[in-house]
Image (spheres, rainbow, N blue to C red):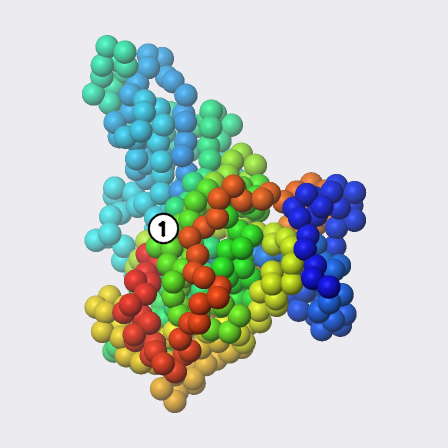
Amino acid sequence: MAVEKTYEKINARIKRGEAVVVTAEEVIDYVTENGYEKAVQEIDVVTTGTFGPMCSSGAFLNFGHSRPRIKMKKVWLNGVEAYGGLAAVDAYIGAAQLPDFDPENKVFPGRFTYGGGHVIHDLVAGKEIRLEAIAYGTDCYPNKKVDTIITLDDLNEAYIFNPRNAYQNYNCAVNLGDRTLYTYMGILKPRLGNASYSTSGQLSPLLNDPYYKTIGIGTRIFLGGGTGYVAWNGTQHHPNVLRGENGVPQVPAGTLAVIGDIKQMNPDWLVGLSFIGYGATMAVGIGIPIPILNEEILRYTLVKDEDILCPIVDFNEGYPYSKPIDLGFANFKELKSGRIKVNGKEIVTTPQSSYPRARKIAAILKEWIQRGEFELTRPVAMLPSADANIEFKSIPERSPSEVFLNGRNRRG
């Protein structure tokens, strides 16, 4: 007998404290122990989580008006410029923005870089931030300069708006060259000295809903320790990519644009990062609940680390110059073991995302739902997706180099 549930029925069970909620790790054991039929009838929600650097992040801030009023032309927060071309006292600060005194030509290896991600982290942590602004002066906004100290409490509004988060799979980066590379994937040692990877594998939100059957515009999520929403598909959203068994993308695919109130958030889950030789970014915590509406949705959430492949990409030539060499694929079980083999050489793997923190996010979201504090939302519109019924080419028919060249896969 086919099982079909609705958001309304699941939310009613959440309100009564009766919902059966498991994490994306726990659902695998649950099905093993109880069987598929029982699991699809009993489980209401599967929670996911990811925590790692997400460069395409930032925050909209409204400072309120000074006396006399000012129309801010240039804005700096702790020396980091925020974009002020919005309105009089609105600004957007990007996580990867660098201060004027430390532009890209000054990001030397071995040097800590304070950037936009750190400003956002400090705001969330309640720290004082120096606000500087200059203007050209008008009849309605005569003030030409502001230099003051603010905290998050002083802002009228402050909300995260991240154009590209929660990447659905990503490349494994290596370095075939003779010198150390300083990249957004961390330090890559020469001559295959290490392999760097990201995403949380079997806990990752979009890998548990590969065709975006439940994750869409309006989906309520865990964002930065508070409640947020999916606002749109993210930039560089490419659903029509090489997929393996059960629809799992084998290259970077979907992304999410997300939004949420910073004043609800926690500095443990929005963390400014400095990557040596690259610059600033921010680690973002995201957790997404997946309602088990039917057997198909449950089947997708049973994805395991060993089922998720990602292409191994040389960042010495293959990434910046698009001259990829076929290095094969690695699965996340191998990557998480700490070592993989590339070109016959066993090398150390270095994660850029935190699996323990992803696990904690999924557990926190599970607890919120069980306590009746977090209900599910039906998407108001679905994300662009590949057709789940399409027969995608298998791995042997396309090499990693073809995948890399044709997929426009850049995290950036």
Q: Which residue corresponds to the image point at 27% horizontal and 58% vertical from the top-left?
A: 108
Tell me where residue 394 appears, x and y as whole percent: 42, 78
Q: Position of residue 260 (x, y in %)?
A: 50, 39
Q: Position of residue 242 (x, y in %)?
A: 40, 70
**Outermost residue toward the front in this view:** 1
For the N terminus, the quadrant is bottom right
**What residue do we see at 41% from left, 21% from top?**
64
Residue 191 higher or lower than 69, as above or below:
below
As drawn, the residue found furthest toward the top would be 139
Graded by Cα atoms within 10 Å as few (under 14), some (14 to 19) or many (20 or more), the crowding at tag 1 reads: some
Name the secondary structure under disc 1.
loop
Task: Indicate the position of residue 21 as horizontal and vertical percent values.
Answer: 71, 55
In depth, the one of 287 and 266 nearer the eye is 287
Identity of the residue drawn at 44% across and 56% down? 385
Q: Amino acid at mark 1?
A: Thr
Task: Please say whether residue 3 is visible from this viewpoint.
Answer: yes
The residue that label 1 is drawn on is 235
Q: Nearer the viewer, residue 346 or 10?
A: 10
Picture residue at 47% right of the left edge, 28% below the top? 157
The image quarter containing residue 97 is top left
The answer to whether residue 329 is seen in the rendering is no
